Amino acid sequence: MTDFNFDTWVNLYRTDPVEFDRQRNLLLEEAAKDCSDPEKAQQILAHINGINFRLSRIKNPIARYNQTVAIFWKQFEVFQESLKGNVPKLNSLSSENVVDFKKR
């Protein structure tokens, strides 16, 4: 990974949000591929794709931002619990883990 310059990323977001998203995705994919466990790398990429999918459905920029913040804090809480040794069990039947498909 190259040196991270926050100001460069802010400027890119302001001038070209589409390119910002493309570069952000490339950076995240690069970081996931650096994972020593290929299975974990695949899980990370799947998680990233899931977040991107959820956010892509939101067209209002403020609503998208609010959803991004909500996702961040939820993951941060999971991280805090894991630091305490309490690894939360995911409920596979939770509506957050189910993707709705349009009926044909």
Image: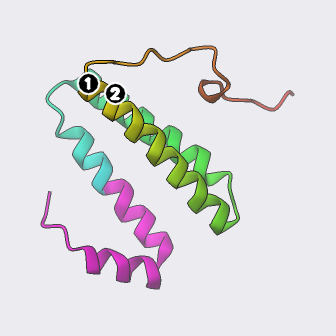
- Secondary structure under badge 1? loop
Look at the image and say whether residue 69 sits in the magenta stretch. Answer: no
Q: Nearer the viewer, residue 24 or 88?
A: 88
Residue 47 position (above or below residue 58): above
**What residue do we see at 75% from left, 30% from top?**
101
Q: Which residues are magenta?
A: 1-26
What's the residue type where badge 1 is placed? Answer: Lys
Specify few, some or many for label 2: CA neighbours under 10 Å numbering under 14, 14-19, or 20 or more: few
Spot occupied by residue 77 in the image (x, y as percentages of width and height): 41, 36
Q: Which residue is mark 2?
A: 81
Name the quadrant of the N terminus: bottom left
Q: Nearer the viewer, residue 52 or 60?
A: 60
Horizontal arrangement in the rendering, residue 36 relative to residue 97 (left or right):
left
Cβ atoms at labels 2 and 1 below 8 Å apart: yes
Look at the image and say whether residue 7 sits in the magenta stretch. Answer: yes
Horizontal arrangement in the rendering, residue 61 relative to residue 103 (left or right):
left
**What residue do we see at 31% from left, 46% from top?**
29
Spot occupied by residue 39 in the image (x, y as percentages of width and height): 28, 21
Name the quadrant of the C terminus: top right
Spot occupied by residue 65 in the image (x, y as percentages of width and height): 57, 61
Q: Nearer the viewer, residue 86 or 9?
A: 86
**What residue do we see at 64% from left, 68% from top?**
61
What's the residue type where badge 2 is placed? Answer: Glu
Horizontal arrangement in the rendering, residue 102 relative to residue 60 (left or right):
right
For marks 2 and 1, give the CA distance.
Answer: 5 Å
- Secondary structure under badge 2? helix
Q: Which residue is mark 1?
A: 84
